[in-house]
Image: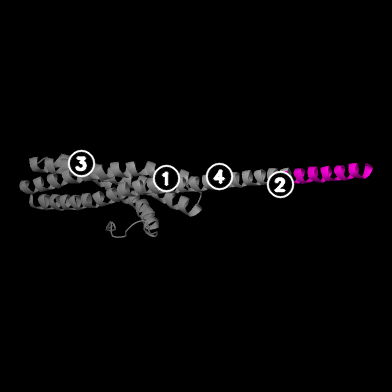
Amino acid sequence: MVREFTRNMFVMLVSIMVGITIITYFIGDIISQSRIDNITLEHVTEISDINSRNENFTDFYLQGAVKMDSAREVREVANYYFDFALFWFNTALANQSKNLTYLCMDNCTNAMDKYLTAHQNFGKSQPYFINARNYTNNSRYLEILGYYIGFSSAGQNITMLRYNASYYLRCAAENLSFGNMALVELLMENFTMVEQAYQEEVQKYQEYRYQIDGYIFFSTIREIPDIQ
């Protein structure tokens, strides 16, 4: 009877131990699976965050680059009008030709329109590059974005200076057509002062330009270097 009881107790203990082992296994498996699920979720979230940052960085950069690219091209067109305007003014002044002053004024008007558009596009590009900096920790990218931001500011400065220079030149041509030489001389003095400021600012613009064009982000055929 005692042996039967002992055997039953042994079987019961073994059963309990087996049950505890099985339960422990299932609990451990559940905990392990939960950890795996958490790690997987963390990785998925991290990958999603990286993808989102990359997409935002690319989106802001490209939008800024498009605006800046447009500004550079429009500025180049404005420079052509400006050069022609100055040519016609000097020719009209040398020949005292009223008809040639009209050619100067027309080119000045076109130059002013293009310079203003370029100025606005340079300004519109800058916030995109500033926002792009929020989506990268890459020091090289941050450095390049800094060049773009500086370039856009320099672009705004030189286009506004050339806008003002074109305005003074147009006024000088208009007064030349009326024979008001005293006003012509005064206006050309203002023109010269603005042009001197432009030549100083364009140096900064070119420095940023060389930095930017040294990377692969811009085509180097966008602009013709300014003749000093």
Give yes or no for residue 11 being in the magenta stretch.
yes
Q: Which residue is at the front of the view, 149 or 182? A: 149
First in residue order: circle 4 vs circle 3: 4
Position of 5 with respect to 61 (left or right) is right
**Residue 49 location, x and y as percent?**
49, 45
First in residue order: circle 1 vs circle 2: 2
Give the Cα distance between marks 1 and 2. 46 Å
Labels 1 and 2 touching (C-beta < 8 A): no
**Residue 24 location, x and y as percent?**
73, 44
Where residue 114 sits, quadrant-wise, is top left
Q: Which residue is under mark 4?
A: 41
Q: How many marks?
A: 4
Give the Cα distance between marks 1 and 4. 22 Å
Q: Residue at x 28, y 48 (%)?
A: 71
> Can I make out residue 193 in this image?
no
Q: Which residue is under mark 2?
A: 25
Q: Secondary structure at mark 3?
A: helix
Q: In the figure, 18 relative to 213: above or below?
A: above
- Look at discs 3 and 1 and give the one toward the viewer: 1
Instruction: Tell me the magenta residue range.
Output: 1-22
Other-residue count near label 3 (Cα within 10 Å), few / some / many at <14 / 14–19 / ≥20: some
Where residue 177 sits, quadrant-wise, is top left
Labels 2 and 4 touching (C-beta < 8 A): no
Labels 1 and 4 touching (C-beta < 8 A): no
Quadrant of the image containing the N terminus: top right
- Look at discs 1 and 2 and give the one toward the viewer: 2
Mark seen at residue 149 = none
Q: Which residue is under mark 1?
A: 56
First in residue order: circle 2 vs circle 4: 2
> Can I make out residue 64 in this image?
yes
Q: Which residue is under mark 3?
A: 167
Position of 48 with respect to 157 (left or right) is right
